[in-house]
Image (cartoon, rainbow, N blue to C red):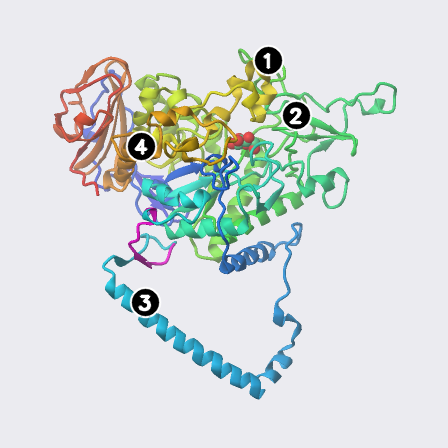
Amino acid sequence: MYKMDLRSRKLKRTNDSASGSSPDKKRPVTSAQGEPPRPRRDLVVLDAGAQWWRSAVVYQVYPRSFKDTTANGIGDINVSSHSSVDRSISKAAEMASDDENEPLLPLHKQAHPLQSLSLDEVLQTENDPDWVRLRIIVMSGAVLSWLAMFCGAMAIVAASPGCFIEGPDDALFPKVVFCKIDLLQQPVSQPGIRSQLQYISKLGVNAIWLSPVFKSPMKDFGYDISDYRDIDPIFGNLKDMKALIDEMHFLGLRLILDLVPNHTSNMHEWFKMSVKKEEPFTDFYVWAKPKNVSEAGKEGYVPQPPNNWISVFGGSAWEYSSERGEFYLHQFAKDQPDLNFRNPRVVSAMKQVLKFWLNMGVDGFRIDAVPHLFEDLQLRDEPHSHKEDSKAGQYDFLDHIYTHGLPEVFDIMKEFRNTLDSYSEKTDKIPRLLIAEVYDTVENTVKYYGEGDQPIADFPFNFLLVSEMERNPRADHLKELIDRWMDAIPTGGCPNWVLGNHDKGRVASRIGLNYIDSMNMVVMLLPGVAFTYYGEEIGMEDVNLSWDQTVDPAGINAGQENYMKVSRDPARSPMQWSINKNAGFSESSSTWLPVNQNYLNGINVEDQEHRFSHLQIYRSLIKLRKTDAFLKGGLHTEVFNDGKTFVMSRVFGDSGILAVINMSNERASVDLSSLSDVPDELTVYLSNRQEFIGKSLNKSSIGQSPYQADVLLFKVDVE
Ligand code: GLC
């Protein structure tokens, strides 16, 4: 049983079962496999309150591939600007710097027109007859126009049956008057991502995680930032971004920004000044002298990297700057120099960046490459990993004990946590979400939750389903992965489930075409946060790319022979909207990555809107997340049919949801009589076999075709 602890803002495990879930004694004594039963996990999300993310679906938009409206083959967020947006941007810049001693980021403040007048001068003009006359005219005009507008608005509201007052059920957004206008019926005037917000909102998701849109030379497609406080012109500008945030909030969607603190682009002003040793930027990055510096000046001298560290994208993690006569560290591409987080000014600068975007209205951050933030001060060589198949020069060749997950990383994350919390405290009291991107063992990853009353991230990503799920997986493996995460997270920690992202292959290609719907069922019905990478809702597949089409630095570094093993390009192909040119993604003659031609065979949004499809199943699944069984029900997972059928139940009181998934290529019939808190008669709410939907089944005999995935309900009302 879990209950909310208001102080630590976390769910705490307790022993009572007063939530209404069925008591433990109802559980079978052994599972169908004869093993002792696993502990019940009754997750009661009581009073999660402002922590909206605890039951959220977060939709990841990779902006380059989402919607191109400038016809250059690259996605964008372009919109026309508004003066109110201008004002809030300069406010964001001012507020970001207000309590920092180090104004490291140029702010371009404009003088206020009245700034040159003293108070006395202002008071003197007050009784000037010309000013008095002007005041009367302006005031009367304002009152009359206000009255006219008010009466007009009232008349329109009265005449429109479609108008109503509504707002999301939490304090984040004020209640507003909405008029039911189907924006999809209107000519779409907002291009780029904004034009697709209606689609995202209609999916039923709660938030968008936007991969980086900051100014960038795009060597790592936005993860190489040259200005943290500006938008790359490819995507639009700051006004577009502000308009996007505002519109998302209006639609009840939150925005999670992707922040990359570990490194900048080598085109960032900080780096350019650091190369020149201009203060205070000299130590902004991790610089080191060549190992053989004592031989400098001798004939044939070639500077040697300070140690054997390898970059994640392959090859030495050091690049020589002849201008500075030193090497700089880059744990990713050589165009991505690592910032030096041992320098307090770097920490302060990054906190200013967080504040800038908080002031712009973002609801949280996904912090990129967290374990890479610190490296060994003594720059010691890393030992060989002795991993099978790893070759010299590849990242896996070494055991990263000096460059990954150092204890100092946690301190910086705590500082970021504090920045977010004190911002919330000073403003609207609504917590902002902090997610850590961590690829590590489960044991190390869950440390980023923090402990007790010292939370760090709200959660680190759970990558088990992307990193360890094999092709054509078995049900018992799926169960093991789910249990491993649930057992590892700290008491009260918010679970989360990532099925795909811009760094990993798509579900259809990585796990198999037969698992698209079933995997969506699993992540949507597990307790906690579910992540969806754009296009997974329609079952997009990886695209095939030739070596010439490869643009991902990881793929390029691997060379022509091996690029397909590591390239992340295949999962980043453009979103497939329709059967129009380039799948409706772009009017351009070519796109930055090729469009997967399967858009012509039903893998596109427009087509799937109108038939039984992955998209329809996805939307129906999200509806279940509003039920008590999902929000408050316990979690029980079990395998049947010799480890080939996966069963998951979410039961609250006498109502519940049951997922039954035959993960094998054979027909199967399972007897679920051992599930004692599930009644005999069940109704099929959803199935990847349309003909089963609506059928009544008896739990003692559930027959399924190969790969059939069913969601069965009892006493659950779905809106
Ligand atoms: C993260 C991002 C990845 C990027 C890397 C370097 O792992 O997800 O796309 O290349 O960090 O920023």
Q: Nearer the viewer, mark 4 or mark 3?
A: 4
Counting residues from the start of the chain, the first of labels 2 and 4 encountered is 2
Q: Nearer the viewer, mark 1 or mark 4?
A: 4
- Asked if residue 177 is among those painted magenta in the image, a careful observer would answer yes
Q: Is residue 162 visible?
A: yes
Residue at image location 88% in from the left, 21% down from the top: 298
**Quadrant of residue 377 in the image?**
top right
Q: CA distance from mark 1 to mark 4?
A: 45 Å
Secondary element type, mark 3? helix
**Quadrant of residue 21 in the image?**
top left
Q: Nearer the viewer, mark 2 or mark 4?
A: 4
Counting residues from the start of the chain, the first of labels 1 and 3 encountered is 3
Q: CA distance from mark 2 to mark 1?
A: 16 Å
Q: Nearer the viewer, mark 1 or mark 3?
A: 3
Counting residues from the start of the chain, the first of labels 4 and 3 encountered is 3
- Asked if residue 373 is among those painted magenta in the image, a careful observer would answer no
**Disc 2 packing (10 Å; few <14; some 14–19; many ≥20):** many
Quarter placement of the C terminus: top left
Amino acid at dot 4: Asp
What residue sits right under mark 2 in the picture?
Answer: 317
Amino acid at dot 2: Ala
* Residue 576 x, y percent position in the rendering: 40, 32
Quarter placement of the N terminus: top left
Secondary element type, mark 4? helix
